[in-house]
Amino acid sequence: MAVMAQTSGYRERNSTADRALNVLQMFSDDRPEISAVEVAENLAVARSTAYRYLQTLVQSQFLDETGRGSFRLGMRILELARIARQGYGLSELCIPAMRELADRFHQTVLLTKQMGNAVICLEREESREQYVRLSYERGTVLSLNAGASALILEAWLPENQVRELLGSVSLRKFTRNTLTDPDAIIGRLAQIRKDGYAITSGEVDPTALGIAAPIFRPDGEVLAGISAVLIQSLVPPGLVDEIVEAVIATARALTDKAALLEL
């Protein structure tokens, strides 16, 4: 009987943990706040039960109450995100170089990494004299099929792996320049691999130009990508060439440092 009771308690704890995770997974860019009613509907439980789950998450600082009858992600989530970025060892390696690029050209500089079938923005740096501030937040999930920051991570993957990745998600068309046909994307990646860098124009935002280069592991796999995101109309063509050269040089230097640190 004691064993049965322990097993039952274990299952209950797992069930509670699963539901807590389901609550956290309800948050998205389009839904930064949730209510007890929404949680109750999502979990198919009574509102009082949903509120109990929410209060447990509030007490552990995974959620905060807004005072408007809704809940938002709490400080503990931010702390875990910071720890997660540090755990990859990339932030400490790349941030100084990213700051140098941002200060030199007054543009947004991103560090991106592929994780499973997603591309994540790990870090973002801007200069104090930033010409235009762009909405790329740390932790943002980028589309696999659009933008230099994402495509640079896929260009050195085997074709069958790329096709599998593209088939695992919905390929969103942001602008008329966005590629959604897998064959066209494969062709684009081949050109990026040949050039050694990616440059995209108006694929995610019609006004933006992206320039990215790969940071490699010692075995030749892409560890991460470093990219500059600019507003095309504000950057003269001659400066674009200079930024391309600087991004490539920075990625090569970071590749050498990553090899020394065995990242």
Image (cartoon, grey):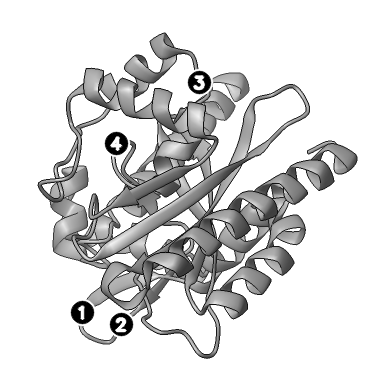
| 3 or 2: mark nearer the eye | 3
Residue 163 shows up from this direction: yes
Q: Earlier in the sequence, mark 1 or mark 3?
A: 1
User: Which residue sits at x=47%, y=74%?
Assistant: 107
User: Which residue does the numbered mark 2 point to in the structure image?
Assistant: 66
| 4 or 2: mark nearer the eye | 4
**Quadrant of the drawing holding the C terminus:** top right
Instruction: Find numbered disc 3 in the image and state the secondary structure of the residue it sits on.
Output: loop
As drawn, the residue found furthest toward the right would be 260
Q: Earlier in the sequence, mark 4 or mark 2?
A: 2
Instruction: Find numbered disc 2 in the image and state the secondary structure of the residue it sits on.
Output: loop
Instruction: Find numbered disc 1 in the image and state the secondary structure of the residue it sits on.
Output: loop
User: Which residue does the numbered mark 4 point to in the structure image?
Assistant: 145
User: For the residue marked with disc 4, what is the amino acid?
Assistant: Asn
Which of the 4 quarters of the picture holds residue 15? Answer: top left
Q: Earlier in the sequence, mark 4 or mark 3?
A: 4
User: Which residue does the numbered mark 3 point to in the structure image?
Assistant: 157
**Quadrant of the drawing holding the N terminus:** top right
**3D distance between C-alphas at marks 1 and 4:** 38 Å
In the displayed structure, would residue 244 be above or below residue 194?
below
| 1 or 4: mark nearer the eye | 4
Q: Residue 20 location in percent, x, y? A: 40, 49
**3D distance between C-alphas at marks 1 and 2:** 7 Å
User: Which residue sits at x=53%, y=62%?
Assistant: 243
**3D distance between C-alphas at marks 1 and 3:** 46 Å
User: For the residue marked with disc 2, what is the amino acid?
Assistant: Thr
Marks 2 and 1: in contact by CB < 8 Å?
yes
Residue 16 shows up from this direction: no
Q: Residues within 10 Å of mark 1 (few under 14, many from 20)?
A: few
**3D distance between C-alphas at marks 4 and 2:** 36 Å
Q: Earlier in the sequence, mark 3 or mark 2?
A: 2
User: Which residue does the numbered mark 1 point to in the structure image?
Assistant: 69
